Image: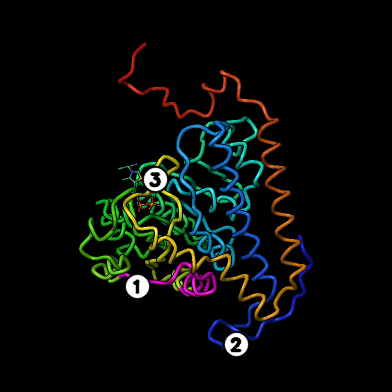
Amino acid sequence: MAQVKEKKTTLAANGSSNGLKTSTYHQWYETMLRIRRFEERALKMYSINKIRGFLHVYIGQEAIAAAITTALRPTDPIVTAYRQHGIALSRGVTSKACMAELFGKETGVNKGKGGSMHFFSKEHHYFGGNGIVGAQIPIGTGIAFAEKYRSTDNICLTMFGEGAARQGALHEAFNMAMLWKLPVLYICENNFYAMGTSVTRSSNVTDMYKLGLSYEMPSSAVDGMDVMKTHEALSEAAAYVRSGKGPYLLEIKTYRYRGHSVSDPAKYRSAEELENYKEKDPIDHLKAYIEEHKLLKISELEAIDKAILKEIDDAEAFAEDSKFPPASELYTDNYVQEDYPYIRD
Ligand SMILES: Cc1ncc(C[n+]2csc(CCOP(=O)(O)OP(=O)(O)O)c2C)c(N)n1
């Protein structure tokens, strides 16, 4: 990791004082780059059959994961959907454990039995990784209930796409969360497409934050291509929820550069639209800001790039060299209710 001086920065994007340390910019840059390089490598590994099944990448959306690392506490639980490698990495699950999980190896974060959609880590307060669209919304609400019940001051980050927002479960969860003033920060990652369906074809209201309003839930939206703005919006929302006033809905407008999953050629959108978003790339944008304001030296940025590439090379080698789990692992880590009445031998 490159050396960082702990000096306070004086300029924000709008030129006003923001009081952030240079280490914060370093952390954002490193986190986003780790996710980007990890997933680029995962796509390559998929193309040579080292990874099978589904693979939904987060490329383009990395600013959200990076901002979470600075706006939330590491003990705040997080639950999200299947586009989730980046969130796990940003939480501190190692690149090795994540890559081995994608390879289906026993050294993976879930012993190779979860795969791309189901990373989970109790140690990192990371509840995954859920393949059923929208199911994580009531799960996150329940986790928030548990935090309140135990009188912790943790808040549960419950993340979902704009497609998932149209599941009925969201409405039941929002109502109960407001009724019981649960410590839950809902994040709608609006990347404008649910598989091949544009939000404009599935939703009359396309500013998803407005879904909170009929529950009188404080709600707002932010540009998720900008890590600084996202950090600020998340920090404010988190402070509100942590103060005990109840839930908050933050819509983060973002974009995924790749198709829904590896097999999707994304013909439902124009090349021009994609290029427009790539011009706002969160990593390039932050790098330019860092250079402009001399927050890190070029040599420091290059050292981060180099260290991340090595980390990803090592993760690939680790996954390749690890073993597949033995067949006996099929019978471990399963939920079994001994007296379940409806299944007989
Ligand atoms: C209950 C359920 N219905 C449908 C699907 C199929 N499906 C998988 S992903 C997806 C789109 C979800 O889009 P969104 O929530 O916006 O997330 P994004 O892929 O954009 O991150 C659908 C319909 C599913 N997995 N689960």
Q: Position of residue 239 (x, y in %)?
A: 49, 73
Please tell me which residue lies in front, 11 or 290: 290
Sequence-earlier tag: 2 or 1: 2
Q: Quadrant of the N terminus?
A: bottom right
Among the 4 quarters of the image, the one containing residue 342: top left
Question: Closer to the N terminus: mark 3 or mark 1?
Answer: 1
Left of 319 or right of it: where is 126?
A: left
- For badge 2, the amino acid type reads Ser
- Please tell me which residue lies in front, 116 or 106: 116
3D distance between C-alphas at marks 3 and 1: 37 Å
| Amino acid tagged 1 | Pro
- Residue 233 falls inside the magenta stretch: yes
How many residues crowd mark 1 within 10 Å: few (<14), some (14–19), many (20+)? Answer: some
The spot of residue 104 in percent (x, y) is 57, 31
Residue 67 horizontal side relative to residue 254, left or right: right
| Disc number for residue 265 | 3
Q: Residue at x 23, y 65 (%)?
A: 205
Is disc 3 placed on a helix, strand or loop? loop
Q: Is residue 25 left or right of residue 58?
A: right
Residue at which label 2 appears: 17
What residue lies at 45% left-to-right and 42% top-to-bottom? 262
Tell me, yes or no, whether the highlighted magenta stretch contains residue 294: no
What numbered label is drawn on residue 218?
Answer: 1
In this view, the residue in front, 323 or 226, is 226
| Quadrant that contains the C terminus | top left
Residue neighbourhood size for the residue with mark 3, other residues' Cα within 10 Å, grouped as few (<14), some (14–19), many (≥20): few
